[in-house]
Amino acid sequence: MNHRLKEPKDLIVESAVIPPNINVDVESATEGGKRRLMLSDNPETLTPVTVPARQATLWHDVVRTTSRTVKHRIFGWHYNKIGGPVKLGITVENKSDAALEVRHIERALEIAPEDGNWIMDVGQSIAKSCLAGTMKRLKPVDRHKFGKGTALLEEFELPEGSLAGFTYDFTVEYAEGHGTLDYVIRTVVSKDIQTDLRGIHAEPLPPVPPPQAHPRGAWSFSETNAQMPEYVVGQSANYRTCATKKLDGKTPADLLFTGTRSELGPALDNRGQFGVIYNATIPIVNDDDEERTVRIYANPRGGAFAGSVRVDDRVYGIPLLRDNTKVCRLADISVPPGRSSYNLSFMVAGSATTPLGLYVITL
């Protein structure tokens, strides 16, 4: 029997008139999570120009470590405009003589036509299943355990004019003994759908530069632990998470997934924090003598937004919020007198626009 949890329900879209002068920047942020993040989103649009050869490596993560176990996440987002179907795949090349094992593979993969609703049918669907832990268990094409050589985790055909969005979570570990793990994970593409993707070992394609500078990189962490400035009961605040710039134009505290922090290059900033679990802490001060109720909304500050959120150990979908006049209620919390704090976590859907406002009011 399949005891996997059901997909999370979406929260409800509401309209709101939000004061313009209550925007607040994130106060501080640190790297979180032990899982590595490999972000394969550049080149995002695959064309004869961006993919000139018959086959190519889109992006990679190169690991050489004495750690026995390494956790990975791959987030990918690729749109096929090459002129015909292509084959995409995920491979792991073991460069060591010692056997390694790829375990606990879970994935969310969505393919949509170019006139599809990418932000919801692909981006939000993946964000919900990743945050909720409801991704599909995947049996790899090749054996879990293998020595020197390249193994195929999965491959799929991407029709012309279609988008593939995907997240893979898995663990790489020694099969037996000790030594150094030495391997390369790749997202690869071939214009010939008969090609054996295991043979593609080329260096990654060069990234498409600005203004089409979609993100890519390989980071040793996959979560953002962000602290908001103090919220005072009775006031209103709209905390700007995942912003490109602070209100004063400087670099935001929570922009951690930068090209310069990537362990491999050339990489580009992951400003939208795609593939990232974003953990937000809101410190709260209640100067009253009694409990007060504080409400937290999600409110897009850059354009259309969707994603997923974990509040009070339950995961929900953040529905399509088309602009900054739309909100969805995340939580109503009872705040005792004195100091307390509230934590929530969210993921940004592929194709969504940031910043995301965490709009806080007192009822």
Image (cartoon, rainbow, N blue to C red):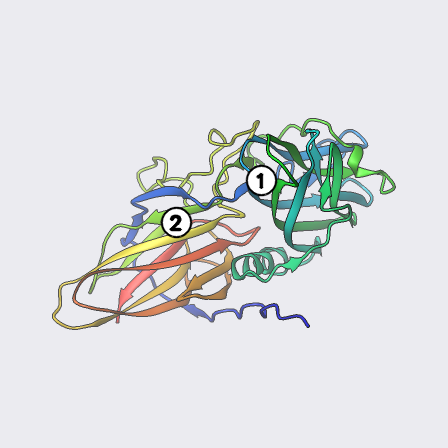
Mark 1 near mark 2, Cβ–Cβ under 8 Å? no
Name the secondary structure under disc 1: strand
Q: Residues within 10 Å of mark 1 (few under 14, many from 20)?
A: many
- Compared to residue 188, the image places residue 345 above or below, namely below
* Left or right of 280, for residue 180: right
What is the spatial separation of the Cα atoms under label 1 and label 2, in whole angstroms? 21 Å
Specify the amino acid type for callout 2. Thr
Residue matched to label 2: 241
Q: Residue at x 74, y 29 (%)?
A: 201
- Camera-near label (1 vs 2) is 1
- Compared to residue 317, the image places residue 83 above or below, namely above
Q: Residues within 10 Å of mark 2 (few under 14, many from 20)?
A: many
Q: Residue at x 58, y 60 (%)?
A: 129
In terms of depth relative to the viewer, which is nearer, 22 or 55? 55
Specify the amino acid type for callout 1. Met
Residue 343 quadrant: bottom left
